[in-house]
Amino acid sequence: MSETSPAARRPAGELEASVLAALWAADGPLTPAEVQGELGGRLARTTVTTILSRLHDKGAVSRSRAGRGFAYSPIHDSAGLTARRMRSELDKQDDRTTALARFVSELTSEDEQLLRSLLDEADPAGTQGAAGTVDGRSPWSGTTP
């Protein structure tokens, strides 16, 4: 039995990302054979079927009967999937405050401003306080607003 060298292995998630990209580009649900064709036939159909089944188990794709098998559709677009993954990681944390604080402390100033803007849009009445300040300091970067 031959072993695959670490250099020859694909990065984790690369196959799932390729399959999702094919589904996002499609006009409708795709069968594993159709996904295989969209990927240029470089993967075995059984491999594509396994990836699609795993994506279904993770809640990333839905499936409907198509003949004797299934046709698959993405549940989220790329941004939605990223948001879902971020939420999933946050849900695993016992100390959400620290996890969020560390996340926002590593944001670029542009991303921090974007996040502030999105939070303000989500709370138009301003019930969360002035732009999320605490004692006149930004909870995001330790700076004053």
Image: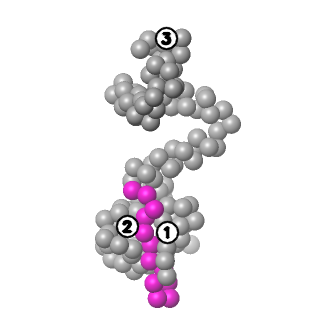
Question: In the image, is residue 60 above or below residue 52?
Answer: above
Disc tally is 3
Question: In the image, is residue 57 above or below residue 92?
Answer: below
Question: In the image, is residue 33 above or below residue 17?
Answer: below
Sequence-first tag of 2 and 3: 2
Mark 1 highlights which residue? 62
27 sits left or right of 134 in the view? left
Q: Which residues are magenta?
A: 66-77
Sequence-first tag of 1 and 2: 2
Crowding at dot 3, Cα within 10 Å, few <14 / some 14-19 / many 20+, comes out as: few
What residue appears at the point 39 percent right and 75 percent down from the top-left corner?
A: 30
What residue appears at the point 61 percent right and 29 percent down from the top-left corner?
A: 97
Mark 2 highlights which residue? 23
110 sits left or right of 70 in the view? left
Q: CA distance from mark 2 to mark 3?
A: 47 Å
Name which residue type carries label 3. Gly
What residue appears at the point 54 percent right and 61 percent down from the top-left corner?
A: 59
Q: CA distance from mark 1 to mark 2?
A: 11 Å
Is 67 colored magenta in this rendering? yes
Q: CA distance from mark 3 to mark 1?
A: 46 Å
Is 81 colored magenta in this rendering? no
Would residue 117 be visible to someone looking at this image? yes
